[in-house]
Amino acid sequence: MSAIDDNREVALQKLFGVRHLPLPRGITSVCSAHPLVIEAALRRAAAEDQVALIEATCNQVNQEGGYTGMKPSDFRRFIEGIAADIGFPVERIILGGDHLGPNPWRKLPAEDAMVRAEAMVAAYVEAGFEKIHLDTSMGCAGEPLALEDELTSARAARLAKTAEDAALRSGRRPPVYIIGTEVPPPGGATHQLDEIEVTRADAAMKTLAVHRAAFTRAGVASAMERVIGIVVQPGVEFGNANVALYKPDRAHELIAALEEMPGLLFEAHSTDYQPAAALSALVDGGFAILKVGPGLTFALREALYGVDAIADVIDRRAGEANLVTTMEALMVEQPASWAGHYSGGADEELLQRHFSYSDRIRYYWPDAKASAAVDDLFGRFTGDIPETLISQYLGRLHADAVEKRVAPRPRDLCLAAIDAALAPYFDATTAR
């Protein structure tokens, strides 16, 4: 066994905790709060006889409700409710907190933002989240966009101290941690991508060293033993219109650094839209945690819009209000979640609102108008969808429908579309 394989096994054992299951090569981290995405992820984990790692981001879920309106304890109940509905054992679910730090409040002065971040981290730990990604890499009001490693690590240690205290106070098992100083922005880039700079090996080593020192100064040196991974940039990212693909030859030196980091693995962010071969190569290189989120809701939106087009053909309501027109009206009426992320003229913004890889339409699905529109769409079907229309508007699912692997009904087709996006991740992380 290589040093990288040994490191991965040690880290995954810490992540899996008391769960007595065969360890896979890695694990897929599903970062989403959409119920159909969660259901698809749990169903895929069940089919693979694996643990399901579900993560909530700081903007989705926090002590103030986030954009989903859920606090960490609400999110836990939400996930466990879906698991109960489909018969997935809750003991096989690991809940994680992603990008936990001052990011939701970065427009405030640093101390105000950190106080809120501490409250958020405590709420996550008290709700039983077992994997905590500490992300203090972004500056707050009056600070540079990217902070120096020493300040980033000091703030991360401060939040780790909060997490350790919360675990002790609530009787929870202390969490495992992910750290990093070169963290890709949550939700993808907002600019045209060329070639992404890969984290240097010495920078990754420095990340570990400065965090170890900061945790010691903060009085939580023992928590460093539960740091299982580091977020680094392997050269993958997605923007609004293109994807930077993983090129293993550019990450050789970074991967080699893992041999000097006993018990640690790399966590790869923004792996959405990477092809299957790239995902497998990432895991081969020690990026044993593959995070995916917008790519799954992008697949869901594709399926919903395909079903919407089919409904217009079947009931001849084309030109009337449908899901697409409802979502456009909602996003124009409430632009806060996409304005500033999309650019160009009116036509370009229209295209990006619905079809951008960054998929900021995902922020609108919890809205009551959007939920009602989806319910209305599903209610427009009284029988099975003809295979020929699935071929026309949902071509990726046609073979599955023909061979009866997927029922030709709207909800089943949406779940199948999400699963098709998930499958390469599970294939890449399953033990060979």
Image (tube, rainbow, N blue to C red):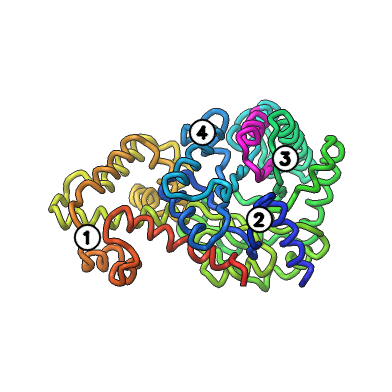
As measured in the structure, the alpha-carbon distance from the residue carrying label 3 to the one carrying label 4 is 20 Å
Task: Looking at the picture, tell me which residue is in the foreground, 16 or 364.
Answer: 16
Q: Say if 121 sits above or below 8 in the image.
A: above
Question: x and y percent of residue 427 in the render?
Answer: 54, 68
Q: Which mark is residue 174?
A: 3
N-terminal label among 1 and 3: 3
N-terminal label among 3 and 4: 4
User: What secondary structure is found at the residue carrying circle 3?
Assistant: loop
As measured in the structure, the alpha-carbon distance from the residue carrying label 2 to the one carrying label 1 is 42 Å
Question: Looking at the picture, which amino acid does disc 4 mark?
Answer: Asp
As measured in the structure, the alpha-carbon distance from the residue carrying label 1 to the one carrying label 4 is 36 Å
Quarter of the image for the N terminus: give it: bottom right
User: What secondary structure is found at the residue carrying circle 1?
Assistant: loop
Q: Which residue lies under the disc numbered 2?
A: 20
Residue sitting at x 56%, y 63%: 194
Q: Which residue lies under the disc numbered 1?
A: 385
Q: Are marks 2 and 4 in contact (CB under 8 Å)?
A: no
User: What secondary structure is found at the residue carrying circle 4?
Assistant: helix
Question: Looking at the picture, which amino acid does disc 3 mark?
Answer: Pro
Crowd around label 4: few <14 · some 14–19 · many ≥20 (10 Å) = some
Q: Taking the image as drawn, is residue 324 in sight?
A: yes
* Nearer to us: label 3 or label 2: 2
Question: Looking at the picture, which amino acid does disc 1 mark?
Answer: Ile
Question: x and y percent of residue 26 in the render?
Answer: 63, 62
